[in-house]
Amino acid sequence: MGEERPVTAELLAGLEAVLMVADQPVTVEHLSDGLGVEPQEVSAALEELAADYDGERGTRRRGFRLARAAGGWRIYSRPEHHDLVAAFLTAGHSARLSQAALETLAVVAYRQPVTRARISAIRGVNVDGVVRTLLLRGLLVESGTDPTTGAVRFVTTPAFLEAAGLERIEDLPDIAPFLPEGDEANRTGEAGAPDVAEFGIMGE
């Protein structure tokens, strides 16, 4: 067995250069192939960069972080700066998701796979147009049909995980028990819908 080689400054710089321009999470395998370095060396370097950005290596804590998301790694602004980033983006021409779209997306995230009728029951409003928007944006996708009704069911996509800064759907904040079930959903309406902004999606 070969000895584990120390992470080089050249590798760290190369990873930073790639990650700064990546518009989606990049896998260790992709980084390994692109930089011509063994996967274990890439993994070690990524962990070192993440710790460095977090101020765990005697360095200043940065305004951004390196985190796992959707099976890869990507640089994100820190949650405590989301309001600043959102204000900067919305001062221009950034097209954000509407509140209705965010609430619908949250319902799907916590109840997937879920039909359009179930989403409407939980939110208390018609969601046809909102679901269509989320499909067009690539945040939702059709996933089979309900075995009882035959209605199309929807689930979130890797693009949703990326936008929320999550690696897996299981990493969502645990508020699902507070979403209404069955007949209760019909009585609750929009009050039962969680706020997606709580886990980082600010719109596009």
Image (tube, helix red, strand yellow):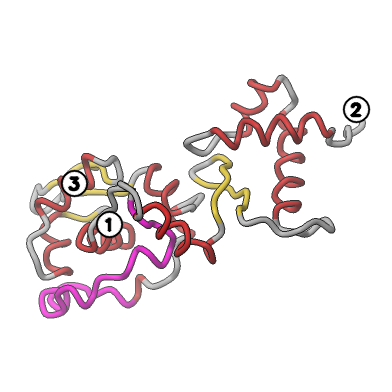
Which residue is under mark 2?
2
Residue 105 numbered mark, or none? 1
Amino acid type of the residue tagged 1 in the rendering: Leu
Dot 2 or dot 3, earlier in sequence = 2
Q: Is residue 203 left or right of residue 54?
A: left
Secondary structure mostly seen in magenta is helix
Q: Residues within 10 Å of mark 3 (few under 14, many from 20)?
A: some
Which residue is at the front of the view, 10 or 117? 10
Quarter holding the N terminus is top right
Read off the magenta span: 178-203
Query: Which residue is found at the position 44% from the left and 46% from the top?
Result: 162
Q: Position of residue 5 (x, y in %)?
A: 88, 32
Residue 133, label in figure: 3
Q: Is residue 79 magenta?
A: no
Report helix, strand or loop for mark 1. Answer: helix
Quarter assignment of residue 175: bottom left
Residue depth check, mark 1 versus mark 2: number of the one nearer the observer: 1
Residue 164: x percent and y percent? 43, 54
> Spatial distance from mark 1 to mark 3, Cα to Cα?
11 Å
